[in-house]
Amino acid sequence: MKRILNILCVSLLCLGYWGCSADESTENPRSVTTLETAEQAVIATREGLTTYFTVTSNSGWTAKPQGSWVHITPSSGSNGTTTVALTVDPASDDRPRGAGVFFTSENSVVQFTVPVFQMKQTDLVVSPDVVPTIGKEGTTLTFTVASHNEYDVDTNCDWITAEPVKTVSPQIAVHTFTVPANEGRGRSTRITFTGKTADVSAEVTVTQEGVKLIPDKEGATIKGEVTCESMPVEGVVVSDGFEVTTTDKDGCYWLASAKKNGSVFISIPGGYMVDTDGSIPAFWRATTAAADVVEEHSFSLRREPNTNHILLATTDPHMANRYNYNKTYTDTPQYREDFRGDIDAFVKEHGTKNVYAICLGDLTWDIYWYDKGTLYTLENYRKEIENFPVPYFQVMGNHDYDMKFTDDFEAAGEFRRIIGPTYYSFNLGDIHYVVLDNMYYLNKDGDRSHDTYVDDEQLAWLKKDLEHVDKSKPVFVCMHCSAYAITSVSDNRVNVNPNFKNAKTAELGDCFKGFASVHYLTGDTHINRAVANEDMPAGYGNIFEHNMAAICASWWWTGYISKNSICKDGSEGGYMIFTNNGGDVKWRWKGMKVAADKQFRTYDMNVVKNHYATDASVKAFLQKYITRSRYTACKENTVYINVWNWDSGWKISVKENGQPLTVTQVRAEDPLHNLSYDIPRTASNGSLTSSFATYNTTHIFSAEAASATSTLEIVVTDRFGVTYTESMTRPKAYTTYME
């Protein structure tokens, strides 16, 4: 079939549809310019194509490919008929693509595009696949569709009209839609193209502006709307950190706000997400007007079914880009290679769909904002996480205060300005997440000190926030400092004391009375320390606290000194993975750069004790720190099993030659952290502070074998019935590179 154009034709899209104006030369037909091709459209396979067709014209003409993978020879001609070769390069991947060849006469009177598609038999391609927001005055939309199969078209609304379809070739058609003027609120729909016989589909989102009229309300100083694809979303919780309200049926809200915290935020509803600013979800807006001036702040959601989702819980990166005495940077390369490398590998395996992350504070290291030669601030941290692969929520830590101030509110000003609110909430699926600031900054005489508790203002806000939460659904409370401290261990159980000042631990727990399941996610300690439901004080058995070890492990020091990542309790530096399937929540620890099923480390204490008795650097260390463990209390043939994420729901069994051994929970120093940090640090004349020193951890288990050389079969089972095993061949090496 030939296309004969004797009118001005202008390409509307590079992928092949056109609109025609009236004939410019109706008064003198002899002056009409003609230009025709024997090919209306080209579809190539993934292997590429060369096809030949004729171009006929009564004047000179040119042809210009509109994609680097499309070529035409010759690309110009004179009056008469010319045979041209159109070549499509082989595709480099399986993604369909489209381009075109733009033909024009020498006087530009005749112009048109021959569309070119490269696709598989199973592809259905729509161009364009993205439509800019349409103004309220309306418009006409035109799409070129290429498909080897028949398909249905649905506008999914009653305000878009489909015009007659124009067939270009057996595989290509042009679809036109009329979008009328909109005198109401904004609106959105999806035009879908679905194969009749083949499992193929494509869709284009169409959004049209409307007339936005949000009236003032007496007493309200902040107003706005929440929409999804320009449609109002009802029931979204909105707050300024003091007052809490919800959007009405039109998606509008009003707050009588004093604007003390300088922001307004939404509690992202389950099944939705917001765009990110860098990697941080943009769920808040800064308030800029005076307290008595009405200002408008609106939010846009996108649908994101996340009933099932994964949360990567991280804490304590302590970014500072600091250098040691050798002027070798210690933290930034480790953060990027160890932590980000591990996160990126996880995302590569699992994808980014319904995967989210949160950092539980100490994003930076306050003293390095002004000292130590690096001047590394929250601005630097925010830049560092710009390309984090999933939405990354943030919690304030005690090292994220501005040490120039002694007032708690003022000291948190930089965090609010750069990162966002210090307390807020959001929802992923059926789980309600609450972020709290559980520190009160004191900074007495510049000591950067703080008390630990959730203040009354936050508690009052929290109670209002929880009024909108279904008590049968899980709640995750994300804070920096732990709510409970373990005082002792016995019979595979732990005893705890409240860690908040005065009675504030109980006051926080009381907010969750009647809730079925509450998880505290905390950091700060740089160790793994779980307090299970069964170990909580009476009346608080619905709470489970996960006090997590740090990304930076021992402040990045073991990575620098010993080329590993060991926390002061012996845990691998890493993060927690929480998997939620419709309210069924499970979790596991993920050490950086170690296999996902690596959940514990074993020690042959015969080897450890011999090293302590013979190694010169150990002897020097023990002379300086006489109270530190020498492991002399360990009997012959003792093994230690350090279960990093242990809680009282775990089980540990050890067999020697098929016979079970008695396993005893002990409180002890992890031998690998001693070897990786304490001993080499002091050997190089470094100071050993209590914050960095090896911790007397509660999740080490001891067993005594009959032989020094037997192989032990160790089975560790978590509270979900997942087993982790090791066939422990002894003697087992004791090195910084040990398994």
Image: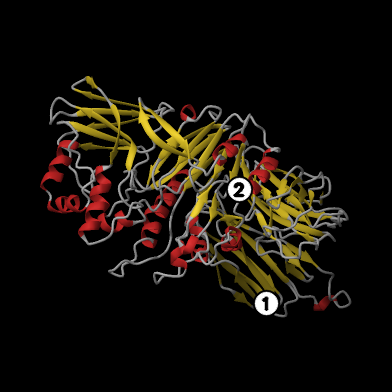
Q: Position of residue 639 (x, y in %)?
A: 22, 33
| 482 displayed left or right of 582 | left
Q: Amino acid at mark 2?
A: Asp
In the rendered image, the vertical position of residue 138 relative to residue 159, given as above or below: below
Residue 78 sits in quarter: bottom right
Residue 48: x and y in percent read: 50, 57
Q: Position of residue 528 (x, y in %)?
A: 40, 41
- Residue bearing the label numbered 2: 455
| Residue at numbered disc 1 | 79
**Residue 435 visible to the viewer:** yes
Is residue 370 left or right of 637 when viewed as pictured?
Answer: right
Judge whether 404 appears above or below 96 on screen. below
> In the structure shown, which secondary structural element does the residue marked by tag 2 occupy?
loop
Q: Residue at x 78, y 55 (%)?
A: 224
Q: Residue at x 26, y 61 (%)?
A: 686
Answer whether residue 598 is visible to the viewer in this image.
no
Residue 403 percent location from the top left of the image: 50, 64
Q: Few, some or many C-alpha atoms within 10 Å of disc 2 (few <14, some 14-19, many ≥20)?
A: some
* Amino acid tagged 1: Asn
Q: Is residue 141 left or right of residue 722?
A: right
